[in-house]
Image (spheres, helix red, strand yellow):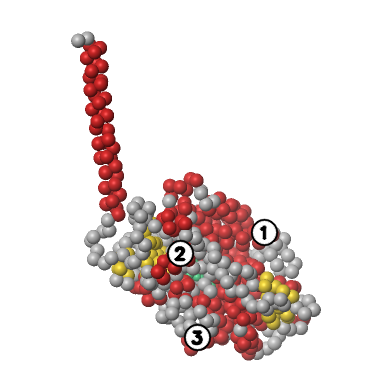
Amino acid sequence: MSSNNCYSTTTTFLSSVIFAIAPLLIIILLLTIFFIKFKQLIPNNNHKQSLPPGPTPWPIFGSIPELLFNRPTYRWLHDLMKDFNTDIACIRLGTTTHLITVTSPEIARELLKKHDAIFASRPLTLATSLLSQGYKATVVSPCDDQWRKMKRALVSNVINHSKLAWLLEKRTQEADNLVRFVYNQANQIGGGVVNVRVAAQQYSVGVLRRMIFGKRYFGKGREDGGPGKEEEEHVEALFSVLSHSYSYSVSDILTWLRWFDLDGHQRSVRKAMEVINKYQGSLVKERIREWSDNKKVEDLLDVLISLKDSDGNPLLCEDEIQAQLTELFIAVVNNPHTIAESALSEMLKHPEMLEKATQEIDRVIGNEAELLQESHVPQLTYLIACAREALRLHPVSTFNLPHLSIADCTVAGYFIPKGSHILISRLGLGRSPTAWDQPLRFNPDRHLPENRRDLVETDLRFISFSTGRRGCIGMELGTNMTIMLLGRLLQCFAWKIPKGVKKMDLRIEEEENTLLIATPLFAHATPRFNPSFYAF
Ligand code: HEM
């Protein structure tokens, strides 16, 4: 037999062996992959309790297909909880992430009061990473040293009682501007129709712009007190970032798809951040460049730049300041305006409430020539009750900001694994039939026995500023801004439903995690006083 023949026989033999065992190898490989995945799917048996009820997950993908195809997600989650007849549910995403949804005040208290330390972190998303320049600030950062540093800086030096007292005049100027803007629309024979949403949104952001940058307008502004195109663009960009922050984007759930930006979220957030940086960023850069330690500290940007660490070096770098300012604007852009808009809409449906709140303001001020001031706010208990009721019944978002658990825990008798995303439903708490009698009725009187002087609700019967380590730092400012906004509108103008509108439309807009009333509130305003009252 020739060597050639021998070689070819050996090759043929080897090929036939490989050919014979190839399917076996493929089967072994598949089994190994399946075993690894399957192992991940088996619940951890070290705990005795079961997970909260929820849909049966698909292998590997969990309930991601349902989550992506049932929009808006908040409705799917709430419907699912109703079907399971539960106040706490668990939706598994992929093999390891658990989404825990909660609709009862008792369970919310267990999470944010009893086990606060365990649930004090935040999940990461593409939008929150972009807005915070890689988690350099407070609101969206996970519970780490950077968050601690920034929160401490905010509470001790930036948003506290003494700084707010120092900046009172700037806030009052913006409240005067609100009245001027609305007066210029209402000062016609028979009054005028006002877009309350625009006035209220621009007031909220205007208050912060004055406190941070010492000025109201990025550009030339407008004579009538309204927003210029720069301010409109700024507010629109803030809302865009806010609405994408925790919106269950495909790229947040299946992170390996981020590159493709399938739902366009990344593009939208980057575009909005360009606008925000164009306005805020250039001011911060310029101020840092021109900074000298002899400069008089005149606004919150000066405060942030002037903070020093224990070695006497600047405490915050430019990125931290930029990120923190964006977060502060995002923190105020929606709450005060939504509360004022929905409270006024409800009061227009119930004119006796409008009358009662206006009479209270007149009585507290006692002197017709004076405009409402922040010092009057604690005495306006009926108006505060109306704002609390608006917060309870018409929350601005379906869920509180998400929390993330940093250890395994037992809640309501169920096992909650480390790394769970916790979504506390603002709708579920505020409209809970066990916590509230006739929950769907707008009834400010239900808050009166408590005689509250603020919007704080630490018992979590509804979410206002929430509570615990991740609780809001803007309770005093948020209450004052909201009540001044609503109070000035009621004090200075008589409001009614515009001609041709049969009833106020309080249907909500079904967008991801936002509950804005579908149509902005257009209401008819007439000045209540002589023109000389508005000449300030
Ligand atoms: C009526 C007005 C306001 C309401 C209803 C409100 C509500 C909230 C809520 C519900 C949270 C999330 C709490 C949680 O995760 O459990 C929050 C967080 C926060 N708010 Fe507010 N807020 C208001 C105004 C403000 C203002 C005026 C500021 C400051 C200028 C502010 C700054 C913050 C910050 C920094 C956080 C993040 C805290 C952290 O994660 O550690 N808020 N707010």
| Amino acid at circle 1 | Glu
As measured in the structure, the alpha-carbon distance from the residue carrying label 2 to the one carrying label 3 is: 31 Å
Asked whether, in this view, residue 169 is left or right of residue 13, the answer is right
> Any atom of ligand 1 within 8 Å of the CB at mark 2?
no
Query: Which residue corresponds to mark 3?
Result: 446
Q: Closer to the observer: label 1 or label 2?
A: 2
| Amino acid at circle 3 | Arg
Circle 1 SS class:
helix
Query: Which residue corresponds to mark 2?
Result: 76
Question: In the figure, 458 relative to 450: above or below?
Answer: above
The quadrant of the rendering that contains the C terminus is bottom right
| Amino acid at circle 2 | Trp
Q: Position of residue 282 (x, y in %)?
A: 61, 54
> Answer yes or no: do the residues labelled 1 and 3 have beta carbons within 8 Å?
no
Question: In the figure, 348 relative to 214: above or below?
Answer: below
- Picture quadrant of residue 112: bottom left
Give the camera-side residue of 110 and 174.
110
Residue at point 34%, 66% (across, down): 53
- Picture quadrant of residue 67: bottom left
Query: Which residue corresponds to mark 1?
Result: 230
Q: Closer to the observer: label 1 or label 3?
A: 3
Q: Position of residue 458 (x, y in %)?
A: 43, 77
Asked whether, in this view, residue 120 is left or right of residue 517, the answer is left
Residue at point 27%, 52% (across, down): 39
Q: Residue furthest right?
A: 189
Give whichever of discs 2 and 3 has the lower sequence position: 2
Q: Position of residue 235 (x, y in %)?
A: 61, 62
Q: What is the crowding at mark 3: few (fewer than 14 residues within 10 Å), some, or many (at least 20)?
A: some
Q: Is residue 70 visible?
A: yes
> Answer yes or no: do the residues labelled 2 and 3 have beta carbons within 8 Å?
no
Give whichever of discs 1 and 3 has the lower sequence position: 1
